[in-house]
Amino acid sequence: MNSFTISRTGTYLTVQDFGRFNYQHLGISPSGAMDHRILSALNTIITKSENQFLEFAYVGPSLKITEGAINACVGGECKIFVQKQNNTQIEHKPYTSINLFEGDELTIHNTIDSVYGYIAIENGLGLQPCLNSYSTDTKAQIGSIPRPLQIGDNFSIENKVSSWDLTFNNNIIIEKQCNFKVYPGPQMNFFSDETIQQFVSTPYIITTQSDRMGLRLKGEPLISHNTHDILSEGILPGSIQIPSNGQPIVLLRDIPCTGGYPKIALLDSEDISKISQLPPGSKITFDL
């Protein structure tokens, strides 16, 4: 048996995968990792992650190996260190496999000019799926572990590491993007041509009120000539809602399943990963 424990949580440490699908009609959000690009990149290095990943925001966790050994890999822009039993500290690069033995402690410092980072471990985390997914929705308390992880949480992995060979991928490029192509939303006709032109010509700033549910933006208000309240209807990740204050909200992974604000536009699904990595204070623009 191989096991590790959480010795430091960092910020908002949860278990995630690529999402929980086909349950939105029951009021259950897709959830899943904010940045699917990094999960796909990690799967080229840790090929047997069992679709079980640890996600953190801004500040990474520390993992202490309590028994046996594991093979891990960290994805995202961050500093990574391993503290050995003899107090030697070794720095590692992202997207490179890390062999960890009993007594070792893996520590990930803050993310660099981004928000989310991830950890993949060979043979997964030893968890059982919840509704066909390992993802965590903390607001709904749904998931294999339906809450943020805590210090002392322990993970046991039955299978042994298949190879101790160093594995890395130097071809991984996670691009930063601040301009996003959008498509007309179902209530775009609630807004005048002038307001729509304002939407695509004015920069917006990501505020600190943003989270896994959505990015709250600040900029020139977008005022509807119709109404800012509609009958609640199904919504998708990437929908851009305009509440009564006129400040756009870009809905992300932990979306509510219905919404009662008009949706001026819809972000491409592949761009959700990109926009979610932009920290508060970032300026973004939209193009139709």
Image (cartoon, rainbow, N blue to C red):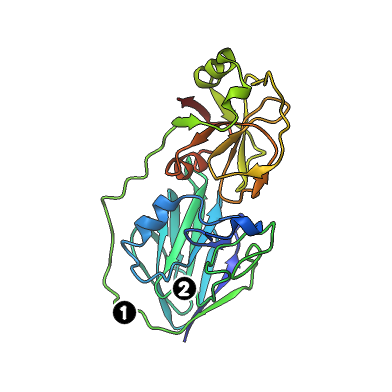
In the rendered structure, which amino acid carries the disc numbered 2?
Asp
For mark 1, give the secondary structure. Answer: loop
In the rendered structure, which amino acid carries the disc numbered 1?
Ser
Who is closer to the viewer here, 51 or 46? Answer: 51
Q: Pick out the residue farthest to the bottom.
A: 1
At label 1, counting other C-alpha atoms closer than 10 Å, the crowd grade (few under 14, some 14-19, many 20 or more) is few
Q: Position of residue 233 (x, y in %)?
A: 65, 43
Who is closer to the viewer here, 62 or 124? Answer: 124
Q: Is residue 278 above or below residue 17?
A: above
Is residue 87 toward the left or the right of residue 144 in the image?
A: left
Determine which residue is flagged by label 1: 162
Q: Residue at x 48, y 53 (%)?
A: 117
Q: Is residue 28 visible?
A: no
Determine which residue is flagged by label 2: 104
At label 2, counting other C-alpha atoms closer than 10 Å, the crowd grade (few under 14, some 14-19, many 20 or more) is many
Quadrant in the picture for residue 160: bottom left
Is residue 73 toward the left or the right of residue 53 in the image?
A: left
Who is closer to the viewer here, 104 or 67? Answer: 67
Q: Position of residue 105 (x, y in %)?
A: 49, 69
CA–CA distance in space, label 1 to label 2: 19 Å
Mark toward the start of the polypeptide (1 vs 2)? 2
Q: Is residue 196 visible?
A: yes
Residue 265, labelled with which disc?
Answer: none
For mark 2, give the secondary structure. Answer: loop
Quadrant in the picture for residue 264: top right
> Label 2 near label 1: C-beta < 8 Å?
no
